[in-house]
Amino acid sequence: MVLSMDYIRECLARNLIMRRTFLHLSQEGLADRAGLSSGFIANLERGKSWVSPTSLEKLSKALDTEPWKLLQDPQINQRGYTKEELSMLWERAKSEFFSGL
């Protein structure tokens, strides 16, 4: 199966948005963490730019994930959350719940 660059670019865009949202990061926050510009992040998320291997590595580190996971089709590879991600979600939910009391 040969995948087009447009398809891979779309997968990257969706994964960036999902992962960034999961971590409660703005585009600017992700840009700061990755050492990239927020305009570049915005263009990636709109599918208007392509990522170099170096930038992909920076993004994956900033998003606490493996680089190859950012290129996977998010609809086909729905493996759910990792144990660490579930733990992080649980801790965040507890913190938000108890801070409101």
Image: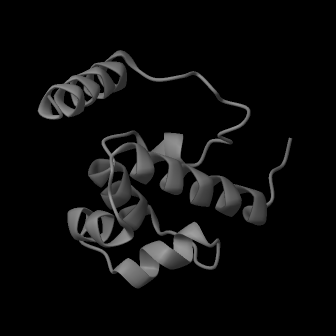
Q: Position of residue 62 (x, y in %)?
A: 28, 53
Is the residue 56 above or below the residue 44 in the image?
Answer: above
Residue found at the far front of this picture: 101
Q: In which quarter of the image is the N terminus?
A: top right
Residue 4 vs residue 77, the one in the foreground:
77
Location of residue 28 with respect to 99 vertically, above or below: below
Q: Residue 58: image x %, image y %?
A: 31, 59
Total marks shown come to: 0
Judging depth in this view, the residue of 55 and 92 nearest the camera is 92
Which residue occupies the foreground of this view, 96 or 71? 96
**28 above or below 21?**
below
Q: Quadrant of the C terminus?
A: top left
The residue at 65%/40% (across/down) is 74
Name the residue rendered at 32%, 27% in the picture: 89
**Please, is residue 67 above or below residue 5 in the view?**
above
Which colouring convention does the figure follow?
one colour
Whether residue 21 sits left or right of residue 80 in the image: it is left
Task: Give the percent coordinates (x, y) of residue 42.
Answer: 49, 76
Left or right: 18 as drawn, with respect to 33: right
Looking at the image, the residue that sits furthest to the right is: 1
Q: Residue at x 41, y 53 (%)?
A: 20
Residue at horizontal 59 percent and vertical 60 percent from the top = 13
Q: Indicate left or right for 4 with 8 as reference.
A: right
Outermost residue, top side:
83
Residue 97: name its quadrant: top left
